[in-house]
Image (cartoon, rainbow, N blue to C red):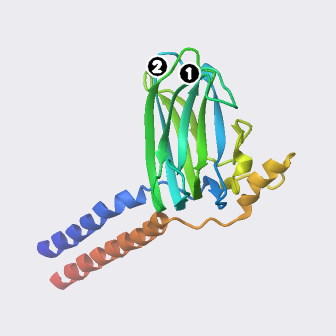
Amino acid sequence: MKKIISLALSVLLTVCVFAIPVLATEDLSCYLYAENTETDFVQGEVSLFIDGSEVVPGNSYTASGMVMFENIGLLDQAGAHPYVSMYSWKEYNADSFDGLGAWTDFAAFVEEGTKDWQEYSFTFTADDPTEYVTFNIGHYYSTGTVKVAWLKLVDETDGKVILYEDFANGINGDWDTPRGDNLTDYGVIGAAVPETEAIAETAEAETYAAETEVPVAPAAQTGSFLIVSAVIASLSAAGYIVIKSSRSQI
């Protein structure tokens, strides 16, 4: 009897050890995408602007994001890549890099093909003064799709979250497209935007059009369902074995 119970508990524990990490996988069904399919292409991106007044000069900050690169092709140009970048602007200039402080393409893919969801990050020290911090999502001499499930900016000094954007409500007025017209398409999949919301500009209408599409569940989510089923089955089996064994002792 004790051996049977121990065996059943061991099976259950093994399933749980492998199941819990998968069950904890975050929801990636809502994301921003930036797509390019043109081969006669230099660069295109969409940008999120963060007010520099939130940034304390001299403090360290970490920019991070959950990113996927899908069906990437690299055009015939040195340095070609899709990217998610972070720029700290002492003074913003749309036409040049004058006034740019710390910056990096903290998420980039310099190969062809697909790279599944992964968290990327970059830590920098804020300059004095900082007018804007921008997140930029796009392509440089590349094709395919960049997907971003969330972006975050955290002050490492006191742990204050300056920005957390998960695109649940689409993209708002803090976003701009200085080179967005160069992209084949961009927008948000899976955003819970009310159907009655009035959208004034054509560009905004294009951004929200994707909300009517049914997002394909990532493999991690499908795996979670299968693991849940396995856990339930294991619990049922363990319970059945214990009950059956107990009755046989009567």
Q: At x 25% / y 64%, what residue is drawn?
A: 13
- Picture layout, residue 98 above or below residue 166: above
Q: Name the residue under label 1.
A: 55
Which residue, as the protein is rendered here, is positioned at the far bottom? 248
Q: Which of 209 and 83 is in front in this view?
A: 83
Q: At x 60% / y 45%, what residue is drawn?
A: 137
- Picture layout, residue 13 above or below residue 99: below
Can I make out residue 226 in this image?
yes
**Residue 218 x %, y %:** 51, 64
For the residue labelled by badge 2, is the local secondary structure a helix, a strand or a loop? loop
- Picture layout, residue 247 above or below residue 74: below
Q: In which quarter of the image is the N terminus?
A: bottom left
Q: At x 27% / y 74%, what residue is drawn?
A: 238
Q: Which of 114 and 193 is in front in this view?
A: 114
Q: At x 30% / y 78%, what residue is drawn?
A: 237
Is 179 displayed left or right of 87 in the figure?
Answer: right
Q: Quadrant of the C terminus?
A: bottom left
* Residue 72 badge: none
- CB under 8 Å between callouts 1 and 2? yes
**Residue 56 x %, y %:** 53, 17
Tag 1: residue type?
Val
Is 152 displayed left or right of 209 in the figure?
Answer: left
Location of residue 236 (image quadrant): bottom left
**Residue 176 x %, y %:** 72, 39
Q: Nearer the viewer, residue 241 or 122?
A: 122
Is 245 displayed left or right of 166 in the figure?
Answer: left
**Residue 226 x %, y %:** 42, 72
For the residue labelled by badge 1, is the local secondary structure a helix, a strand or a loop? loop
* Residue 59 badge: 2
